[in-house]
Image (tube, rainbow, N blue to C red):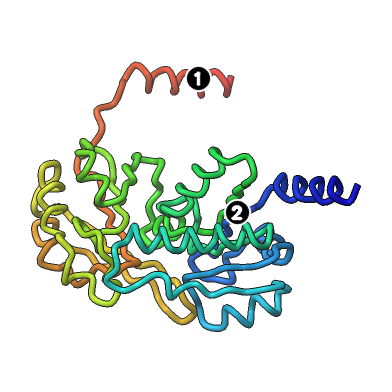
Amino acid sequence: MTELRHQSEGEAVRRRTDRITLVGTGMLPPRDITAGGMHAIRSAEVVVYSATWPGIGRWLTELGARRVEDISSLYRLNGVDSENYDAILKAVLDLARECGHVVFLEPGNPHLGVSSTTALTRLARELDDLEVEVVPGVSSFDTIAADLGVDYLSRGTTIIDSNRLLIYKIKLDSTLGVLIYHPASVGNARVDFEAPWRSNNLSLLQDYLLRTFDTKHPYYAVISASAPGRNTEVTRGELGELAANARLFQYGSSLYVPPAANFELDEEFVRRLTKSMADKQT
């Protein structure tokens, strides 16, 4: 009986579903963490972070986090980006296997340009004993719209990572705006967050954009406010000088290129819309 009981307990342990909750800390933490994110922090067995803000450990403890782990040392300067993320993912997954429920804090929105989110959600689909939940936070996608006064939907916007734009040879449309993430690491797989311009092949991105836009067409380098007392930085330039201005682009920078051409209107569709408004008024 004792042996059977131990076997049953072992099976129960093996059947346990471990949980990883990715919580977005927003652009200005802790202000931008949602109520759902705070609830997850309080309910998890351990809270893990690799991106910090001043006083994060104390704030998490005061909020009610049971255990806090700083794994920022795994993100190594000059390391290969994918290897850094693999080390972080292994640490988070190991803690989930040890503790059951882990919250992993990610800047901004974990579902916007975060490789670890993609890897973890894919892993959860493959494993029966792992659940991954994402709690969004305010992202730079939101703040850039406010910083530039741009409505992404009014004219349409192509949104893509700089390296994926070049890898996939995405065909750009001059009637649409282009919002490009990570312009500080074009053609470079290593991490240099101290001086990214040293290894940034920004000329490759410049040449690609000039296939669609004129050399005099404007661009905007945007760094949204991400810490108390830090103001948003917006710098306007011309695409023909993009590579020469590589020092403008930090790891938190994004690049916005406004539309260069007007749409060709579908007059029949415009008449249909106008008629529908007139019918409603009558």
Tell me which residue sits at (10%, 54%) in the image. Answer: 216
Crowd class of label 2 (few under 14; some 14 to 19; many from 20; radius 10 Å): many
Residue 144 at x, y = what percent? 39, 59
Tell me which residue sits at (37%, 64%) in the image. Answer: 84
Figure quadrant of residue 250: bottom left
Q: Residue furthest right?
A: 1
* 1 or 2: mark nearer the eye: 2
Tell me which residue sits at (20%, 45%) in the image. Answer: 166
Q: Nearer the viewer, residue 31 or 112?
A: 112
Q: Secondary structure at mark 2?
A: strand
Crowd class of label 1 (few under 14; some 14 to 19; many from 20; radius 10 Å): few
Image quarter of the C terminus: top right
Q: Which mark is residue 276?
A: 1
Up the image or down, 214 lies above or below 268; here it is: below
In-image side of 74 versus 199 (left or right): right
Disc 1 to disc 2, how far (Cα)?
A: 40 Å
Q: Which residue is under mark 2?
A: 135
Q: How many marks?
A: 2
- The amino acid at mark 2 is Val
